[in-house]
Structures are given as structure tokens and as C-alpha cells.
Image (tube, helix red, strand yellow):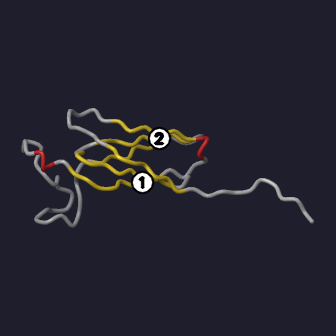
Amino acid sequence: MRHAKLRYHGTLYFQAHVMAERRDAAVYTFTGKGLAVQASTHGAEVFPASEPSPQRYLDGVFTIPIQSRGDACIVELRSDRPDPCQFATCEWVGMAHSKARVAR
């Protein structure tokens, strides 16, 4: 598997833990911080955490880099905050290789 694209909605925070064979676990965090958001500064939260409005929850696609064999890795989605997490789909991209060919 090369990477996975996780579609989220109504979400403010989550972590993707990638545990691949013979590598240390990698953690990729979605925090609601972003670039190219109207009236934002680099690295600032898109909406302040104290704002109770449901409009502060975000929709989009988060790319999780994996770079491992599909049968040799585990990807877990975790959140230790009280903010809601909703996921719609997860698409993955990989490469297929044939193991043997018959010579003719």
C-alpha cells in the first residue's frame, strides 16, 4: 500500500497510527489547522476551540502515507479529545505484482 485517503466530515481532531512491519509506529495528526483558509495565519487553528458553533467542524480528505505491504501493516484511527469524529470512506492506493510467470 502506498497511501490511504480518508474522507471525514464533522471532525476537528484525530490521529492515524501506522504500524508497519520492521518500522517504528508513525503518527499523523489532523488538528483542523490548514493553509489557504480565508483570514487565517500559517499554523493557526481554523476555528478557536472555545467556539461552540457546529460550523467549526470540518469536512475533507486526509491523506495517510503508508508505504508498506498490505498484509504487514495496521492503520488505527484514534482520538483522545471530546470532539466528534465522523468518517465516510477510506480509499487506498497500492501496486500489484505477479509472483510467477510461465515461460512459453
Neighbour tally class for label 1: few under 14, some 14-19, many 20 plus, Cα within 10 Å: some
Q: Residue at x 27, y 40 (%)?
A: 85
Left or right position of 81 against 91 = left
State the residue position of label 1. 5
Instruction: Decide which of 69, 97 is in the foreground and name it.
Output: 97
Q: Position of residue 70 (x, y in %)?
A: 59, 45
Q: Position of residue 4 (x, y in %)?
A: 46, 52
Q: Quadrant of the C terminus?
A: bottom right
Q: CA distance from mark 2 to mark 1?
A: 12 Å
Left or right position of 4 against 97 = left
Name the residue type under label 2. Val
Q: Secondary structure at mark 1?
A: strand
Q: Quadrant of residue 54?
A: top left
Q: Residue at x 29, y 42 (%)?
A: 86
Query: Residue extending furthest front?
Result: 88
State the residue position of label 2. 75
Position of residue 36 relative to residue 48, above or below, is below
Instruction: Decide which of 42, 81 is in the foreground and name it.
Output: 81
Between discs 2 and 1, the one toward the N terminus: 1
Left or right position of 22 against 50 = right
Name the residue type under label 1. Lys
